[in-house]
Image (spheres, grey):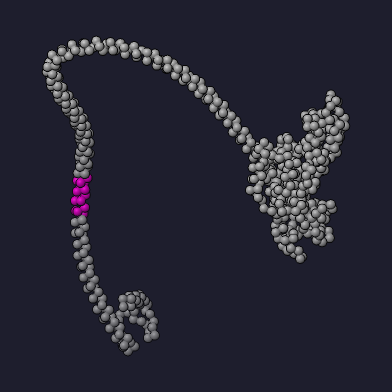
Amino acid sequence: MGGLKDELLKAIWHAFTALDLDRSGKVSKSQLKVLSHNLCTVLKVPHDPVALEEHFRDDDEGPVSNQGYMPYLNKFILEKVQDNFDKIEFNRMCWTLCVKKNLTKSPLLITEDDAFKVWVIFNFLSEDKYPLIIVPEEIEYLLKKLTEAMGGGWQQEQFEHYKINFDDNKDGLSAWELIELIGNGQFSKGMDRQTVSMAINEVFNELILDVLKQGYMMKKGHKRKNWTERWFVLKPNIISYYVSEDLKDKKGDILLDENCCVESLPDKDGKKCLFLIKCFDKTFEISASDKKKKQEWIQAIHSTIHLLKLGSPPPHKEARQRRKELRRKLLAEQEELERQMKELQAANENKQQELESVRKKLEEAASRAADEEKKRLQTQVELQTRFSTELEREKLIRQQMEEQVAQKSSELEQYLQRVRELEDMYLKLQEALEDERQARQDEETVRKLQARLLEEESSKRAELEKWHLEQQQAIQTTEAEKQELEQQRVMKEQALQEAMAQLEQLELERKQALEQYEGVKKKLEMATHMTKSWKDKVAHHEGLIRLIEPGSKNPHLITNWGPAAFTQAELEEREKSWKEKKTTE
């Protein structure tokens, strides 16, 4: 509410100053009644005709001051304002009260309606202090936007030249000076009135009406599903669509909130450049004229939804606030710098006063020094006169002394000779003393060196003694270990000899066993050979000759030729020997 109140006060200030005909800061009560009634009407605030009378009941005669009107304006009008009135109508009412008195009579390249829009833009961009002005930074911002809207290039050099010619006594321009600046065509050379008017209208829509984007697009109906061309206007929380760009026949609104989203759609049903706006209760299909316009609208709607999620104001309002904060910061820094400069200037003045005081003291000291110099010169003259008298007397005394000097010169020569000899002896004595001192120093150095060497030798000797004891202990330990190892070696050697003897005995036994094995093997081979021969012979004569052998008491085996001549045990023995023979072969 504070920001809305500040914006309303700017327009009201223009109306109030227009009623102040003699520029005394006072307006008559009758005029304030009309102004208050009109404000209540356009702001849709209940009008209390008695309130103004009650507020100024002690001031019936004469005009009412601005300071006296502000408490009434705040209490009975501005504090009751809701955001449900027509801002354009409100500004138009205030404009009507002040335009005839302030607008220049010289012909302008813009219409009065365009001048009104520039006046409203001025109130939006002006500083929050009275009398209202627009600073050069905001003038540059506005002229840049107008130039871009006209499709022209911004000429920074021209604006810098304009700022150089700007009145140094002024911090900015008033609303009427801004209208004259834009209306005289200085920054819109080569542009016709229609182009300038369209540019002013575009900037007005953006800055004042919060129109973020507008243009023709096709919209698909919800009931009949037909496509109709509409003029769309995007604002911070709503998209309105009209039959045409004159905004007279409104067909509907698309309410935007943080839950809405916008999506691109592929071409279908002969429609191209499609995109979708999804809201809580409805979904809107829209077709742009080309891909560039489609992308621009998607980006603009997406940015608007993002600002709604963040709770941020429109970009141009946020940018205006940042610029104002930056100017306030720079102003505070400038004021701080001026304060520091004043402090430095005061300190400099104090220093100047101190220097002036020192200079006066120096002048006084110089005066005293001059007096002292005069006294010194006078004393010097007196001393010179006295010295001349003393000099004459000294000459007489000198003559007497010369005679005495001539007499004693020979004595002096002898005395000087003796003095020279004493000086030589003194020098030699000094050299001898120096040599003795140096010798004592050398002796002291050698003594300290010897003491240090003795100390080191004693330390080394103690360390060697310690090492010697440790070595003796190690030798004793080694001797004991050596004896034990020797005993073990003797024992192991005896065991080795015994093992060698046993090994030799085993080797001898192995050889005997091998010889026996060879003999047995030969006998076995001979027996095997004999057995084979007998088998061959038996096989050859089998059936013709039958050996008669003693019978066994055991039961005999029966063969094809009758009872066998061997028992079952003999048969098993023969099979066993036959298998062993076959294995050896």
Can residue 350 be seen in the rendering of this structure?
yes
Quadrant assignment, res 566? bottom left
In the image, residue 57 sits, relative to residue 277, either above or below, namely above
Residue 548 left/right relative to 84: left
Residue drawn at x 39%, y 13% as measured from the top left: 375
Check if residue 491 falls in the magenta segment: yes
Q: Look at the magenta stretch and give its main secondary structure.
A: helix
Residue 226 placed where, x, y %? Answer: 82, 61
Residue 148 left/right relative to 568: right
Residue drawn at x 83%, y 53% as measured from the top left: 251
Magenta range is: 480-495
Residue drawn at x 53%, y 23% as measured from the top left: 353
Residue 528 placed where, x, y %? Answer: 27, 79
Quarter placement of the N terminus:
top right
Quadrant assignment, res 222? bottom right
Residue 226 left/right relative to 485: right
Check if residue 113 falls in the magenta segment: no
Residue 557 placed where, x, y %? Answer: 38, 80
Question: Which is nearer the eye, 391 or 85?
Answer: 391
Residue drawn at x 76%, y 52% as measured from the top left: 193
Residue 206 placed where, x, y %? Answer: 74, 48
Quarter placement of the C terminus:
bottom left
Can residue 145 be seen in the rendering of this structure?
no
